[in-house]
Image (spheres, grey):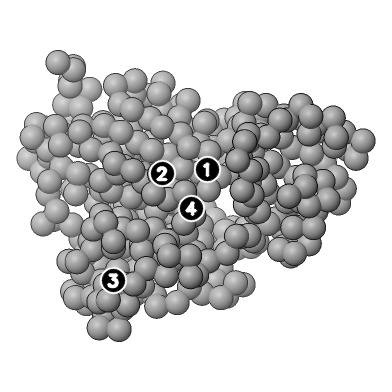
Amino acid sequence: MKDLSRYQRQFLLPEIGPEGQAKISSASVAIVGLGALGSVSANLLARAGVGRLRLIDRDVVELGNLQRQVLYDETDARENFPKAAAAERKLRQINSEIVVEGEAADLNPETIEELFKGIDLVVDGTDNFETRYLINDYCLREKLPWIYGGAVAVEGLTYVILPGEGPCLRCLFEEAPRPGEFQTCDRAGILAPVAHWVASFQSIEALKILAGRKETVDRRLWKGDLWKKEFRAVDAGGAPRSGCSGCRKGEYPYLDRERGSRTVTLCGRNAVQIFSSASVPINFKNLADKLSPFGAVHYNDYLLQASVPPFEITIFLNGRAIVKGTEDASEARGVYAKYIGS
Ligand SMILES: [Zn+2]
């Protein structure tokens, strides 16, 4: 029998109780994106004793993340550690009684079935609508609750999706904003407390669902301006939108690969992500020898980084790469083909 005294302040609450705590401890949650939002949610849910956390992120820790991403430190940034691995390392120190699974991977139609296997609930910590619509499609099909969150500049937004019981993300936002239309953290900046507010709202709704208190879930779309302290809760309408092909007809275009791309321009960061179908892990030593004439190369167990001015390439074991120095997908594909080979 596990010592549950560490959760005493939590199950003292009549809202949770020992019964709710037991349910929380046997639940599995996936957190997609471990940046400003996801790192805060992961921290809160690990400390709350969620039995299994699957942490999915495709990126590495950089110095500029430390202002708001609570699970990382300067060592992680210096080592270019994948966020998923750094978060796993830190959360295991915080709570050794739960299962923490870091997945340094991209969530896409090809990987989602595997990455979401056995999951009860999904928390959104992503920074793009393509991934959110993919999560929405998957969760509608599997009838899994998921919790949308977004934060940019001084404003945050969050909403709980309970498939079959209310509007989904596509009911609220029929189409993804066009590239450049939506503010991004990289162009507009972000204050850490804004992300922490959104992630706290997401986490409390997650705890309600996990503790078996779904009837208390807040079904409104919350918008907050933390600078002005202006908060609005918008009624999402109760029933799914009549024209939503996901809720009404069971159509999942993002999951079925009719929508979405194989390259993703990364959120105003002058970088493009490229997916490869490498079937065997990349041999970093061989690749480092090949790339060293062009500029600095270093690698660890997870990834290799090479400077090939004016570009910088980060490549992961499975061939997925991030090309920095361009936002043009075809130029990035060209750089990849030239230096990595396809
Ligand atoms: Zn819908």
How many neighbours does mark 2 have within 10 angstroms: few (below 14), some (14-19), or many (20 or more)?
A: some
Q: Hey, what amino acid is under mark 3?
A: Gly
Q: Which residue is mark 4?
A: 110
Task: Measuring from the top left, give residue 12's x and y in whole percent.
Answer: 11, 32
Residue drawn 63% across the image and 26% down it: 301
Q: Quadrant of residue 62?
A: top right
Task: Measuring from the top left, give residue 32's x and y in whole percent.
Answer: 43, 48
Q: Quadrant of residue 119?
A: top left
Q: Which residue is mark 3?
A: 250
The answer to whether 224 is drawn above or below residue 274 in the figure is below
Q: Hey, what amino acid is under mark 2?
A: Leu
Task: Measuring from the top left, give residue 216's x and y in whole percent.
Answer: 13, 56
Q: Disc 3 to disc 2, how far (Cα)?
A: 22 Å
Q: Which residue is mark 1?
A: 105
> Counting residues from the N terminus, which is met first, the one under dot 4 or under dot 2?
4
Image marks 3 and 2: residues in contact by CB distance under 8 Å:
no
> Counting residues from the N terminus, which is met first, the one under dot 4 or under dot 1?
1
The answer to whether 185 is drawn above or below residue 298 in the figure is below
How many neighbours does mark 4 have within 10 angstroms: few (below 14), some (14-19), or many (20 or more)?
A: few
User: Could you say which is closer to the camera, residue 21 or residue 162?
Assistant: 162
Q: Which residue is mark 2?
A: 115
Q: Disc 4 to disc 1, how far (Cα)?
A: 11 Å
Image marks 3 and 4: residues in contact by CB distance under 8 Å:
no
> Counting residues from the N terminus, which is met first, the one under dot 2 or under dot 1?
1
> Counting residues from the N terminus, which is met first, the one under dot 3 or under dot 4?
4
- Location of the N terminus by quadrant is top left
Question: Which is closer to the viewer, label 4 or label 2?
Answer: 4
